[in-house]
Image (cartoon, grey):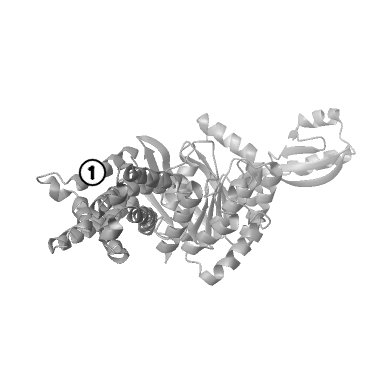
Amino acid sequence: MDFVLEAAAVTKKFAGRKALDEVELKIPAGQTFGIIGRNGAGKTTFIKIALGFLRQTSGEINLFGERPGRFPGRAGYLSEKSDYHITFTGREYLAYLAGFSGVEKKAVGGRVAELLSLTGIEDAADRIMSHYSKGMLQRLGIAQSMITAPDFLILDEPFSGLDPSGQRDLCEIILKLKALNKTILVCSHILSHLEKICDGVAIIHEGKIIRSGPIASLLVKKDRYRLEIENMSDALFDALKSGFAMTRSGDRKIVFEERAKGEKEILLKSLIDKGVIINGLSAYKESLDDYFNLEITKTAGGGQ
Amino acid sequence: MKIFSLAVFGMVEYYRSTWLFFESILIAVFLFFTLLSTNYALLSAQDVYLNIGIFAVVGTFFTSFRLLERETNPRIYVVLTKNVSRREYIAAKFSAAFTVSAAITTALFALEYFLTSAKNQFGPFEAALRLTPAYLVIIISAMTVVLFSKLVMENPLSIGWAIVILMMGFAQPPGVLNYLAPPVQQLVKMSFNPFEILDCLYIFFGFLYSTMAFFAASYLFKRRELNYEQN
């Protein structure tokens, strides 16, 4: 498997304080990868090292197999703060950026139009950016990060400050970029969105990566199932609960853990015998939000 | 070409953000002091070129300082994640600072030339030719400000070194400092004195100083960490 970004034992200290502590992370090409963590956990510091804006105190980090910052145009970046040169119109701004990014003069117009269309800001393209809303600036931020047609995109808190509809729209833009086979690294606190768009995640806590891997394998719990049921009384649930490890998850759902092989079949038979209608049975998948909170609590409490 | 495009971008952005308001005020102040002279129309070319020499240093200092401050914030990430090396970035910032400073200096010179008796001493072509050393003063001043700017040095107080060096260049103190400071005074005097062969040395030294300052600024900027959004 090809990796766009490889970090080995990356440590960064600021005035003696460790902002990153032996970070190990590999981001496979073509995947959308999320880094999640609390404020000050080290997400932005890691990104800046990956882009060559900061230097690690120790360890090694490679972007496309090279030292970070060597080929600046190969990684697009949406910074956490939407701080742009707002005296330009969106179209002018992108055209200037394309101009010094090496885009051929003849191709600049087409490239700008393509990005304005991709990010859905054609209507505002000829307005001065100081009149843009936060959502428009985020869209423009995505457009500017794509101006060099980079293979790798780094989006730092892309949803911050956006209303729910703006967040949903931005999710769709990221999914469009994903469909273009771009490798994307997203840092965000909005875990429900990351769950939708990411193939893999890493949890960073106090500068350390405490969990990382494909999202499906992290969130799907082995031997845990979700049952969708109808016609189950509280008395029946309580009676079954004494024999099986099960909890209610909403009105018509129960989560069941199979502690011994064959226990699932016994429970299903019992439910059917008692007249309960079973509408579905699936492997239980935790939400990223729950998973994150649990892992952070476990780490903070000293347990792994 | 990239440096040119980036310099144009920097100049347009600076113009749109400031409308060159400060520069206009500075021109007005210098013009005002010229016009304060009772018989300003009789001021000689020497007075005009000396005034322009001072303006070249002061105007360039403030213009370069303000222009370089424009991107000591997260906006720099937008530029440096494009196909732009840090050396190209420094070259573009210097080019933009030089162009704006040269334009305002030329504007002030044109006004003073027509208002004073300088027009009677030198024809327009010779007067313009004699302005050439002032452009080298602008190159030296702009490069000094770039080298000691917050952008390159990180420490905002380092700009004080640029002030000291430019003042030393203008004053040319005796002794070893005379050889350390850039030849600002000699270049200013070159505008109104007859050209001597020794002046070639000052021109060479001026370019050498600017080139060394450029490479030092590029080297330091390449090595510096850019951390503008701390948690």
Position of B122 relative to A87 (above/below):
below
Give residue A124's quadrant in the image: bottom right
Q: Along the horizontal axis of the image, is A296 left or right of B180?
A: right
- The front one of A1 and A67 is A67
- The residue carrying pointer 1 sits among few (fewer than 14), some (14 to 19) or many (20 or more) residues within 10 Å by Cα, namely some
Where is residue B40 shown, x and y percent of the image? 31, 47
Where is residue B91 shown, x and y percent of the image? 35, 58
Question: Which chain contains the residue that carries disc 1?
Answer: B
Farthest residue, direction bottom: A106
- The front one of A229 and A94 is A94
Residue drawn where x is 57% and y is 44% of the image: A157
Position of A232 relative to A280 (above/below):
above
Where is residue B37 shown, x and y percent of the image? 30, 43
- The front one of A282 and A212 is A212
Where is residue A181 shown, x and y percent of the image? 59, 62
Residue drawn where x is 84% and y is 43% of the image: A278
The residue type indicated by label 1 comes to Met
Image quarter of the N terminus of chain B: bottom left
Q: Secondary structure at mark 1?
A: helix
Residue drawn where x is 66% and y is 43% of the image: A192
Residue drawn where x is 85% and y is 31% of the image: A236
Farthest residue, direction left: B175
Q: Which residue is mark 1?
A: B167
Q: Along the horizontal axis of the image, is A255 left or right of A304?
A: right
Judge whether residue B193 can be spotted in this image.
yes
